[in-house]
Image (spheres, rainbow, N blue to C red):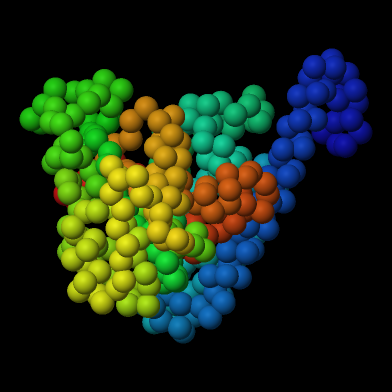
Amino acid sequence: MNVKDIIKAIQELNPGDKHRLRAYLINALTASSSTGNVLHEISERKNKEGYHCPDCDSEHIVRNGTYTTPVDGDEVEKQRYLCKGCKRTFTDLTNSTLYRTRRLNKWIKFVECMIEGYSLRKSADLINADKLDSETDISYVTLFYWRHKLLSALNKMEFSDFQGIVEMDETYFLYSEKGSRHIKGREPRKRGGTAKKRGISNEQVCVLVVRDRDKMTFSQALGMGRLTKDQLEKAIGHKLSNKNVLCTDSWRAFKTYAAEKGMVIYQFKSSSKIRTKGIYHIQNVNSYHSRLKDWILRFRGVATKYLNNYLTWFQALEAIHHQRNNVNINDMIIKGNLIPIMETYDTLRLSEFSK
């Protein structure tokens, strides 16, 4: 069929089908162009210090031809490389989030849905709404693995040292085995449920949030029950020095940690009427806790083994002020493909939370 035949066929469509075709072409052409730009940017930033073999880290790399990947009917050309040390071939996407992904063009729309915080089922519906009848639907199960491969990579990104005044406080989430078919030691809980014990116990997962006044943020699940000094040192000890001033709640682990590091510390009791001491307070980190818990409610329970990924997700959204635009979408995909990961569907599904 030539172009004239296609135009004639389009003219014979009813208004509803013409509108649907127009929307599809706009989305498809935009996705194709954006995908090509993203792949080029990943290659540029990944190889900014020269080529390295992902297997043996050798720098003796040569180009080894190209191959194409179909993106909405277009062919996106990608470079293949050969390591002269171990004789293995690789591409810019080897051991990355997009490695062996067959629907590259759908990632733009998927990350858009992630920024909006849509559920997997709603995301699948929106992504599949842009396809032609001949295309296969993308399952929400596939999107689940896409989500966690991307978040696993973002979770490994290095962050800068904290500067100046640093607010530090912990919050707690009920331990969850959501999705598990074989829960031991207790009855399954519906929609998250409640703890059997009052207050903070070994049923609760401790999440530490640290922020400086430049909004540099660290958030991570550290273990079960109360926070310890050793957990603090292991998690963020290398990012703090005696030049920092700590603002925390009254938990004794913070005071012991600050004393050993030679740091000035201001502590605030939750029951006290005094919430600030001049410029020193923990209001920023407490506000972050509140926004985090409100946001995570939409998922109606998060399996603890995936909790760190959700903390990374929220942290990424906070950094872009939850604004969805092409720059933020592309930037999230690019950053998520600069960190080498070995995650597969099996490793994600069979992962466990380290207590």
Residue 181 vs 93, above or below: the answer is: above
Instruction: Give the image location of residue 205, x and y in percent.
Output: 23, 43
Question: Is residue 177 visible from the viewing direction of this image?
Answer: yes
Q: Position of residue 334 (x, y in %)?
A: 56, 58
Residue 329 x/y as whole percent: 61, 49
Which one is nearer the viewer's eye here, 347 or 167? Answer: 167
> With 198 as the anchor, is 273 left or right in this view?
right
**Rendered residue at 71%/40% (across/down):** 28
Q: In the shown orientation, is residue 214 left or right of residue 275?
A: right
Residue sitting at x 88%, y 37%: 3
289 vs 119, nearest the viewer: 289
The residue sitting at the bottom extreme is 60
Q: In this view, does 142 lie above or below 222?
A: above
Residue 196 quadrant: top left
Q: Is residue 67 visible?
A: no
Residue lying furthest front in this view? 273
The residue under the point 44% across, 45% down is 287
